[in-house]
Image (cartoon, rainbow, N blue to C red):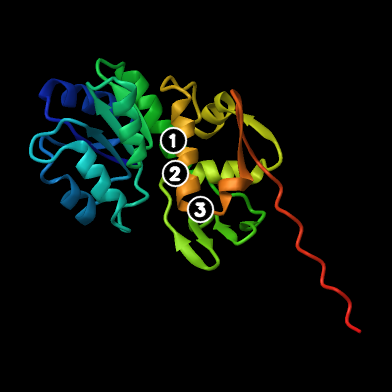
């Protein structure tokens, strides 16, 4: 049974979210201030955080930044829940590492759907074909560890899943809609900019992908097949 922490200062919304999540079988705890969210997630981490953007004490963006900057909480999935519906606000949340974004008013059943989808993608058993590799990149699917030249690079849950999908579909042109469907695991209504933000974050964290992960104009992305290693000239 997965544990969900809901950080929401509106008692009616918090009660609604708790009711629907508990009805679906989740264990739910609620905080009505941003002051204690980071400490709670560090001492008793939930499996997923539903985070209001406009919290008293400490705002949601600050909390998201702090959690993503701490190795102990960096990969915990975060769904932002906020009354700020502008494209700029959504992108700001995603840029800081939020995995998903819902604006108020919202359908609580959709929130449950997104929670289940995100946890399902994170908890899905890894393929038994062994680790993935791409040039200097190595991906340990069992331990959710990404390294470049043996140095670990920390990715959020959604960044890891997107990278895994790109690696297992290298050489194919992937539309943004396909990526939303297969990586986010449901009919996502947040807009294709979500894919663009996550691709940009992958390029920033894995700079050697900047040229290999190409943009297909007005369509999507393609991870090029790695260049073959240069042949060693014969001796003598």
Q: Which residue is mark 3?
A: 206
Question: In percent of the image, x 42 and y 45: which residue is there?
Answer: 157
Res 17 → quadrant: top left
In this view of the protein, can residue 114 be seen by the observer?
yes
Q: Earlier in the sequence, mark 3 or mark 1?
A: 1
Q: Is residue 221 left or right of residue 122?
A: right
The location of residue 96, given as percent across then percent down, is 32, 41
Q: Is residue 134 left or right of residue 95?
A: right
The location of residue 7, given as percent across then percent down, is 18, 35
Question: In percent of the image, x 25 and y 15: which residue is there?
Answer: 105
In this view of the protein, can residue 29 be seen by the observer?
no
Q: Which residue is mark 1?
A: 197
Q: Which residue is mark 2?
A: 201
Res 8 → quadrant: top left
Spot the residue most to the bottom.
Answer: 236
In whole angstroms, how far apart are the C-alphas of marks 2 and 3?
Answer: 8 Å
Up the image or down, 162 lies above or below 235; here it is: above
Q: Nearer the viewer, residue 70 or 77?
A: 70
Callout 3: helix, strand or loop? loop
Up the image or down, 221 lies above or below 83; here it is: below
In whole angstroms, how far apart are the C-alphas of marks 2 and 1?
Answer: 6 Å
The quarter in which the N terminus is drawn is top left
Mark 2 in CB contact with mark 1 (< 8 angstroms)? yes
Q: Is residue 232 left or right of residue 33?
A: right
The location of residue 39, given as percent across then percent down, is 16, 52
Callout 2: helix, strand or loop? helix
Q: Nearer the viewer, residue 20 or 155?
A: 155
The quarter in which the C terminus is drawn is bottom right
């Amino acid at each position: 049974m997965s544990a969900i922490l809901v950080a929401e200062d509106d008692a009616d919304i918090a009660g609604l979210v708790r009711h629907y999540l508990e009805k679906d079988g989740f264990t739910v705890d609620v905080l009505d201030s941003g002051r204690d969210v980071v400490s709670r997630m560090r001492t008793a981490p939930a499996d997923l955080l539903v985070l209001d953007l406009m919290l008293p004490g400490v705002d949601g963006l600050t909390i998201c930044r702090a959690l993503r900057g701490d190795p102990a909480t960096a990969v915990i999935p975060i769904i932002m829940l906020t009354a700020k519906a502008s494209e700029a606000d959504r992108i700001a949340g995603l840029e800081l590492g939020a995995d998903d974004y819902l604006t108020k008013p919202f359908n609580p059943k959709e929130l449950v759907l997104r929670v289940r989808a995100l946890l399902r993608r994170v908890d899905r058993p890894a393929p038994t074909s062994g680790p993935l590799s791409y040039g200097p990149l190595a991906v340990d699917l069992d331990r959710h560890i990404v390294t470049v030249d043996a140095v670990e690079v920390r990715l959020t849950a959604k960044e890891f899943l997107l990278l895994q999908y790109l690696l297992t579909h290298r050489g194919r042109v992937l539309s943004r809609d396909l990526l939303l469907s297969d990586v986010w695991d449901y009919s996502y209504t947040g807009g294709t900019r979500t894919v663009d933000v996550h691709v940009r974050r992958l390029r920033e964290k894995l700079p050697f992908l900047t040229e290999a992960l190409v943009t297909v104009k007005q369509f999507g992305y393609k991870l090029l097949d790695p260049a073959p290693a240069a042949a060693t000239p014969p001796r003598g």
